[in-house]
Image (cartoon, rainbow, N blue to C red):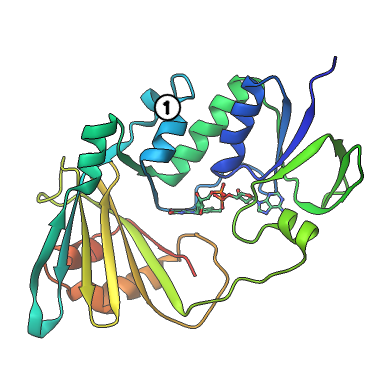
Amino acid sequence: MEPTKVGVIGAGMAGPALALFLKAKGYSPIVYERNNKPSEAGLGIGVQQGGHQVLAKIPGLLEHLHGWPRDEWHFYSVVEEDEGLLGTSDSEGKVRERKGLGTICMRRPILQQRLVEFAEKAGVPFKWGHKLESLQQDDERVTVSFANGARETFSFVVGCDGLHSNTRACLFGEHPATYVGLCMWGGVSPAPDYLRGKSVALDVYGNGASMIVIPMDETTVMWATTQSEPESKETWRTVDETVAEEFKKSSPYSKWGFGVGELVRDSTSITKVF
Ligand SMILES: Cc1cc2nc3c(=O)[nH]c(=O)nc-3n(C[C@H](O)[C@H](O)[C@H](O)COP(=O)(O)OP(=O)(O)OC[C@H]3O[C@@H](n4cnc5c(N)ncnc54)[C@H](O)[C@@H]3O)c2cc1C
């Protein structure tokens, strides 16, 4: 009997991982991604214990990811009248001790690239430049139409196409996400001495704004700020050099204490999420 053909829409995090497991179970998954190749966009991803357990089931993957452990959080206030350490938490480290696997962090493009490589090695075909536009289903099959004119038929289709999923919209109608008014700016910076080689993340609070700092490997950290801003479309792309320089120079975060201002000023790239 022919293996069951499954359309997996989206080659972000979920798509390639799901395709690997489907393949291992004897299905015949094909991944369709609207972009022409894996994306270089994005900052870092923290994979918590549950996700780490899933990745550990893919033979050899963890050894190729070099995920950096995150065991502790240190919380600071930079509010002028109440500056200082607010507290610490080692709950992620405790989970690692108890379960053997904890939280790991890495650059998002690395995780996506490795998942795609491992899925391809397992024999999963990837069709890049295929944006799902519509799907029709009956009792027997699902037919997908792509923006490039291609049409494919599957036994079933799984939408792994992220926040603005077309698959979901085709099945359940448009339900636009509600913007809560918060926007994220983030960046990648060389790890300062006080974080180098450590499994410690920072969570820093100012007036109406906050910032997290997360080690990605021994020498690199990512930081991300949250602040109120009018809505714009999420892209995860790096902002151009002039905008980045302006942010480094003028954003209030550049002046924050506890070493985080230095991280913003030393960023090698800056990304605005939405
Ligand atoms: C470019 C990018 C960079 C990101 N960077 C970060 C980051 O640095 N840190 C972080 O915490 N989160 C980041 N995210 C979000 C994070 O990857 C997801 O929120 C989370 O991991 C869930 O993964 P997912 O596979 O469900 O969705 P996603 O990772 O968003 O992947 C969805 C995939 O589906 C594709 N797609 C969308 N619509 C269609 C369509 N109609 N047809 C075919 N393909 C389609 C997208 O191009 C994307 O590759 C990023 C997302 C993207 C798309």
Instruction: Please give left or right for residue 14 compared with residue 94 in the image.
Output: right
Amino acid, disc 1 = Ala
Q: Is residue 255 visible?
A: yes
Quarter of the image where one finds residue 268: bottom left
Q: Position of residue 192 (x, y in %)?
A: 15, 52
Task: Report the front residue among 131 and 15.
Answer: 15
Tell me the element at label 1.
helix
Q: Position of residue 150 (x, y in %)?
A: 87, 43
**Is 202 located above or below residue 138 in the figure?**
below
Q: Position of residue 94 (x, y in %)?
A: 20, 41
Task: Report the front residue among 119 and 130.
Answer: 119
Q: Residue at x 18, y 75 (%)?
A: 255
**Is 124 located above or below residue 76 in the figure?**
above
Screen quadrant of the N terminus: top right
Q: Residue at x 57, y 42 (%)?
A: 14
Q: Position of residue 274 (x, y in %)?
A: 49, 70
Q: Residue at x 66, y 23 (%)?
A: 23
Q: Which residue is mark 1?
A: 56
Instruction: Tell which residue pokes out farthest to the top in this image.
Output: 1
Q: Is residue 151 visible?
A: no
Q: Residue at x 61, y 20 (%)?
A: 122
**Is 215 located above or below residue 29 in the figure?**
below
